Image (spheres, helix red, strand yellow):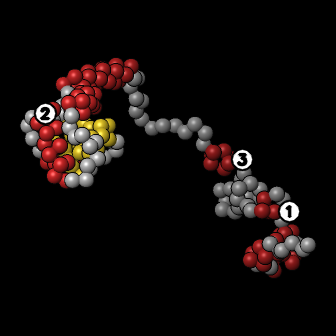
Amino acid sequence: MNPLTPAERRDLRAKAHHLEPVVMIGQHGLTPQVLHELDLALLAHELIKVKVLGDDREVRTAILDQAVAALDCAPVQHVGKILVLWRSNPEIAKAAKAKAARVRAIDAAAQLKKAPKKTGPRAPVDNVRARRRAATPEWGSGAAPATGKGRRGAARHGTTPEASPAAEETSSTTRRRAVRRPREG
């Protein structure tokens, strides 16, 4: 197999980051049964992680070299006891191309079904401000309306402290403090 370019190796390392090891190589090393399992995993997934349970780094490197030679795959990464192997599978590539072609065909059909967009200014469905201005004459004059959203608290509900002459002398902060007295109890 041709060696991977650094960009391909980087992409494959990123894809393999979330994978779990699918094959574990124990004390007996790379047996024919383990090679068969590696081959099946590469056929099914293309990119696999392998865990080697030995402590010797040279043995793990030798296992990686043997697996690459026997399976005609490319080594992507070797970090600690984890090996990452990749081998292209033409059947998976064909299936991916066929799926992409189906998706493109569905998208093209959906584009044909769509109605052309209307151009020009959009008229508002409900012009709330225009209705409020028409309903309350003092709204446009700059003064706050007697009821509604323009007033707060008691003034909104018709019980205004502005009715008494003493209220004119008090400031707004005094009125707020008078409303926020602590409860006695």
User: Is 122 in front, or is 83?
Assistant: 83
- Kind of residue at disc 3: Ala
Sooner in the amino-acid sequence: mark 3 or mark 2: 2
The residue that disc 2 covers is: 70
Q: Secondary structure at mark 3?
A: helix
How much space separates mark 3 and mark 2, taking CA atoms? Answer: 86 Å
Q: Is residue 97 visible?
A: no
Q: Quadrant of residue 83?
A: top left
User: Is 37 in front, or is 101?
Assistant: 37
Contact check, label 3 and label 2, Cβ < 8 Å: no
Q: Is residue 183 left or right of residue 90?
A: right
- Kind of residue at disc 2: Ala
Q: Residue furthest left?
A: 2
Which mark identifies residue 159? 1
Q: How many marks?
A: 3
- Residue 93 location (% of width, % of height): 22, 26
Q: Residue furthest right?
A: 185
User: What residue is drawn where x is 67% and y is 59%?
Assistant: 141
Q: Quadrant of the N terminus?
A: top left
User: What residue is drawn where x is 9% and y is 41%?
Assistant: 3
- Kind of residue at disc 1: Thr
- Of badges 1 and 2, the one in the foreground is 2
Sooner in the amino-acid sequence: mark 1 or mark 3: 3
**Mark 1 Cα shell of 10 Å, populated few (<14), some (14-19), many (≥20):** few
User: What residue is drawn where x is 69% and y is 63%?
Assistant: 143
